[in-house]
Image (cartoon, grey):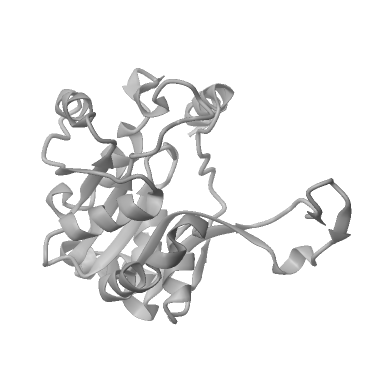
Amino acid sequence: MDTTFQSQTERIRGCSGVIFAAAGHSSRFGDNKLFALLRGMPLFCHCIRRFAQWIPLRNCVLVVPKGEQEDFRRHLDAWSLGELPLTEGGATRFDSVKAGLAALPEAVSLVAVQDTARPLTPLELLQRCLVNADQGGSGVAAHHVVDTIKIASPQGLVLETPKRSSLWATETPQAFRRDWLETGYNTVKSRADTLTDDAQVVQMAGFHVLLVENHAPNLKVTYPQDLVLAEALLAQA
């Protein structure tokens, strides 16, 4: 690891926190996908366990669905992750992230939001996003789009083909100055149902969003067959 980057990560370690988002409904998966086993470990534990190698779990929070705290706690304890606080999410992702933000310790000034359905996220990517947030206010993991994208009507009629060179697909982690994220979640709540990631919330509040390019596999498990791909990617790691 580059010594400058290492010193940067050590400097921000104590003031960094993560909101682990786990309050979704897994509607496209069936049962709660986060309890599905991946190499013998519940899916949601993978990124938490990896990040815990560096970030203090007491500075983080796991946001879970109403009524499922006991199930999540049991798995955390089984994998020696019991230090991680839990809080109950809301009806939407917006509500859940906002609840997680309120549950973080006051000492946390840099916040990353991480989908727990992404079991492959490298620790180094989290660190790069947080370093960018420390230096420029935001750091959002993303990768260049390689497919040709079509904008189409509801009937499937192609209306436009945007230039691929300017298109990025965002991922998590998405890291921000805490005050930026709090301002966003307190000012754009009227648009909560239309917002699909935290970068939108921050940008709509008037702050800039900086992308952090990621080349490593960072699969989001959405369908049961995604677990097979995740297993294969973990085997290559």
Above or below: residue 180 compared with residue 59: below
Residue 134, x across and y down, in percent: 31, 74
Q: Quadrant of residue 232?
A: top right
- Where is the N terminus found, in terms of image quarters? bottom left
Q: Nearer the viewer, residue 157 or 132?
A: 157
Q: Is residue 164 left or right of residue 29?
A: right
Residue 220, x across and y down, in percent: 51, 39
* Residue for point 39% across, 49% down: 93
Above or below: residue 226 compared with residue 208: above
As drawn, which residue projects farthest toward the front?
A: 190
Report how many numbered discs are placed on residues in the image: 0
Above or below: residue 13 compared with residue 31: below
Q: Could you tell me if residue 2 is visible in this image?
A: no
Q: Is residue 191 left or right of residue 15?
A: right
Q: Quadrant of residue 103?
A: bottom left
Residue 155, x across and y down, in percent: 84, 46
Q: Quadrant of residue 126?
A: bottom left
Q: Nearer the viewer, residue 7 or 134?
A: 134
* Residue for point 78% across, 49% down: 154
Q: Could you tell me if residue 86 is visible in this image?
A: yes
Residue 174, x across and y down, in percent: 41, 60
* Residue for point 30% across, 70% down: 186
Above or below: residue 96 compared with residue 201: above
